[in-house]
Image: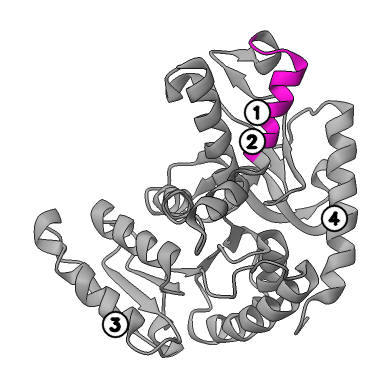
Amino acid sequence: MSIKKISIIGSGNVGSNIAFLLLAKKLAAEINLIDIRPGLAKGIALDLEDCRFFFKSNISIRGGCNLALLKSSDIVVITAGKPRSPGMKREDLIRINSGVLGEISKTIKKLSPKALVIVVTNPLDLMTYLVLKMTGFSSKRVLGMGSGLDSSRLANIIHKRLNLSFESINPVVFSAHGKDMLVSDLTTAAGISLKGYFTGKEAKKIKDLTVNRGAEIVGELKTGSARFAPASACTDLIESIAEDKRKLSFVSVYLDGEYGLKNICMGVPVVIGAKGAEEILEFKLPLKEKRMLKRTGESFRRQSAMLNNT
């Protein structure tokens, strides 16, 4: 086990499920849960401790309110922040969560200057950019868990339509984690593009279902949002880092000329290994998809002006 300590800031549904998966997979020697709500992180940590017998795991698990718990972490996961509520403007969510993550970033920089940081808080790509700027860390060490989740959702929709094994499905989702995501025509099932299985109208419906999957889940739950799939996507990244897998994942990272974009964070194909984002791969995209990426990049640059503490 190469990872000694992982700290998760935010102990809600996603954060607690990440901790459970890390425990089950035995990916760290120590897991810390941190949340501002009194008793929440401590209570979840106690519950997780009681799971250790079933996994035959001696992992240390702690929980509390104090950010000092993240000292000397190898990996810090940020799920803290306010979810977008009905009627809330995106601009308001950006301002609120940038204030929260700005303060967290300062603490990470001070207490865990060598950590890799994985951002889960929305709006994900902008929050990843903020954390990168506030910590001053290498762009290889600040990742946003975004389009990897969207890719898994696309794979699930294709699986249900075609009844194909997941091993045969290669989902490709770029760009924003949100309504501006790009469900690419590079997506294949058994090596064949979606156009080989579906009419243009059917393929568009599959793309729309992927874009709206998160909202669909929120609509059914009424209170709360997706938890298991985001936690699984984040844990998959951590596993790639811990085991130095050099696995291709779709992750929000800082772009400095890749895909013709600069000074933004966006979901792109990245090789994930022990050092974090070890290499950004530039796929040859259709012209219309290049244009979509450019439009989203321009939108991100405008929205970055709303970030607090930058």
Q: Residue at x 53, y 47 (%)?
A: 272
**Direction from residue 63 to residue 105 in the image, left or right:** right
Q: Element under label 1?
A: helix
Judged by depth in the image, the label closer to the viewer, 1 or 4, is 1
Q: As shown in the figure, which amino acid type bears the numbered disc 1?
A: Ile
Which residue is most to the top? 196
Of the residues under marks 2 and 3, which one precedes in the sequence? 3
- The reply to whether discs 1 and 4 touch (Cβ–Cβ < 8 Å) is no
Q: Which range is magenta?
A: 197-210
Q: Element under label 2?
A: helix
Of the residues under marks 4 and 3, which one precedes in the sequence? 3
Which residue is under mark 2? 209
Whole-number angstrom distance, CA of label 4 to CA of label 2: 30 Å
Q: Position of residue 249 (x, y in %)?
A: 56, 41
Whole-number angstrom distance, CA of label 1 to CA of label 2: 5 Å
> Which mark, residue 206?
1
Judged by depth in the image, the label closer to the viewer, 4 or 3, is 3
The colour mode here is one colour
Q: Main secondary structure of the magenta part?
A: helix
Q: Dividing the picture into quarters, in which one does residue 63 lie?
A: bottom left
Q: Position of residue 209 (x, y in %)?
A: 64, 36
Dot 3 crowding, Cα within 10 Å, few <14, some 14–19, many 20+ = many
Residue 167 in view, yes or no: yes
Judged by depth in the image, the label closer to the viewer, 3 or 1, is 1
Which residue is under mark 3? 42
User: Closer to the camera, 106 or 35?
Assistant: 35
Q: Residue at x 83, y 75 (%)?
A: 306
Of the residues under marks 1 and 4, which one precedes in the sequence? 1
Q: Position of residue 131 (x, y in %)?
A: 65, 72
Above/below status of 67 relative to 280: below
Which residue is under mark 4? 262
